[in-house]
Image (cartoon, grey):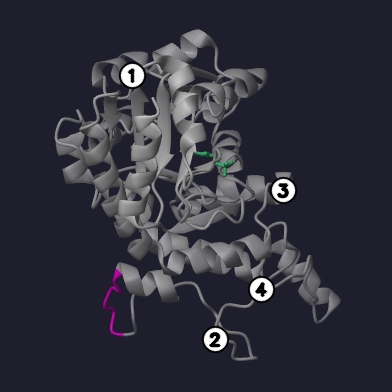
Amino acid sequence: MSDSDGRTRRFATDAVRAGQHRSHEGEHAEAIFATSSFVFSSAAQAAARFAGTEPGNIYSRFTNPTVRAFEERLAALEGAERCVATASGMSAILTTCMALLKAGDHIVASRSIFGTTVSLLSNVLPKFGVHTSFVDMTDYAAWAGAITPATRLLFLETPSNPLCEIADIARLAELARAHGIWLVVDNCFCTPALQRPFALGADLVVHSATKFLDGQGRCVGGAVLGPAKLLNETVFAFVRTAGPSMSPFNAWVFLKGLETLHLRMRAHSDNAQAIAEWLAAQPRVRRVYFPGLPDHPGHALARRQQDGSGGIVSFEVEGGQAAAWALIDALEIFSITANLGDAKSTITHPATTTHQRLSAAERAAAGITPGLLRLSVGLEDAEDLRADLARAVRRL
Ligand SMILES: Cc1ncc(COP(=O)(O)O)c(C=O)c1O
């Protein structure tokens, strides 16, 4: 956002200030507008609001000041014209597809995406005539080769969940532009504090606000960001009609999360780097997936495209599922939970949790082996986290 001299404010200022429109009460923290509807001063005003000839609130399925504050703040941080908040990260992805696509349209998606997104694209959208081809996210010839005349969008996560593969957003944006189609980036792992897909040419960004945007594991929410005209005519219109809306309370929690986002993302990245380096030196650990390690295939690209490596570290232990489960069960600090992006460090066994619903072939294609573990490295002291892992690794 800009100040009255036209000077663009910096990230940390927008994170704390953007989107707040103080009410006549003069509240310092943002207000939670816990109301389902808004009152009109006259029948004529009600008609004008519904007709769209007068701006203003109508009904919280699609207009709520607290939700709008979150939308404006996240839009400022991502460098987007418009943000539409949604009830969850999955509803942000569903909304994007339902709003932009019609029966007969085709998606090309990275194979290395969140398991539930794979299910959505493979099992739900085909019922509505929208089909998806999956490609290896770093095989740019495969992306180009999968595009057909029916393709309307390319979809990816970078870094990917859970293997932290890195794809070149600018290169895929160029491909999308050449075909007149949209590039949609799920920016969940990096958040705008570490990666700004619009600056690299992406058309739309989706978020699970549940993760690092909240940052303390409290609420489920999501967001779609992009050009104002496109979003107003498609994504906002879909949310208004279909109702996958964010609650004002959740929006308020996410507003508080955004205020510390840049500080937390740096701390998550630093802690994750320390843990990844330590894991890489353990003989019972076969492989560590973390873009901050020099031997990671996406290391150089991540350094170019991101301002930090993020908080997710995956690694494979010798001994398959039995060893992976034994390691999990020996930990005292890491929480066994499927969420990520929390101040509390978490550990997940993707093959039997987040990616359980995939077929064995889909899991194998996505590199989800039985010995794979995913850490979301939190904000505890890195030395304590290392000691916790060391105790568990010793038991293997
Ligand atoms: C990368 C990514 N995108 C989307 C989602 C879905 O978000 P939500 O759980 O808020 O629906 C997740 C959830 O883990 C995720 O990791």
- Tell me the amino acid under the disc marked 4: Ile
**Residue under circle 3?**
243
The residue sitting at 30% across, 74% down in the picture is 9
Q: Nearer the viewer, residue 60 or 161?
A: 161
Q: Earlier in the sequence, mark 3 or mark 1?
A: 1
Q: How far across and how far down the image is residue 293, in percent? A: 19, 37
- Tell me the amino acid under the disc marked 2: His
Instruction: Tell me, yes or no, if residue 1 can be seen here.
Output: no
| Left or right: 138 in relation to 243 | left
Q: CA distance from mark 3 to mark 1?
A: 34 Å
Residue 114 to residue 244: above or below: above
Eye-nearest disc, 3 or 4: 4
Q: CA distance from mark 3 to mark 4?
A: 20 Å
Q: Quadrant of the C terminus?
A: top left
Q: Nearer the viewer, residue 351 or 322?
A: 322
**Residue under circle 2?**
28
Q: Is mark 4 within 8 Å of ligand 1?
A: no
Estimate how packed mark 4 is, as few (under 14), some (14 to 19) or many (20 or more) residues with alpha carbons within 10 Å.
some
Q: Quadrant of the N terminus?
A: bottom left
Eye-nearest disc, 3 or 2: 2
- Tell me the amino acid under the disc marked 1: Asp
**Residue under circle 4?**
32
Q: Nearer the viewer, residue 225 or 312?
A: 312
**Residue under circle 1?**
136
Q: CA distance from mark 2 to mark 1?
A: 48 Å
| Left or right: 220 in relation to 241 | left
Element carrying mark 3: loop
Q: Is residue 186 magenta?
A: no
Q: Number of callouts in the render?
A: 4
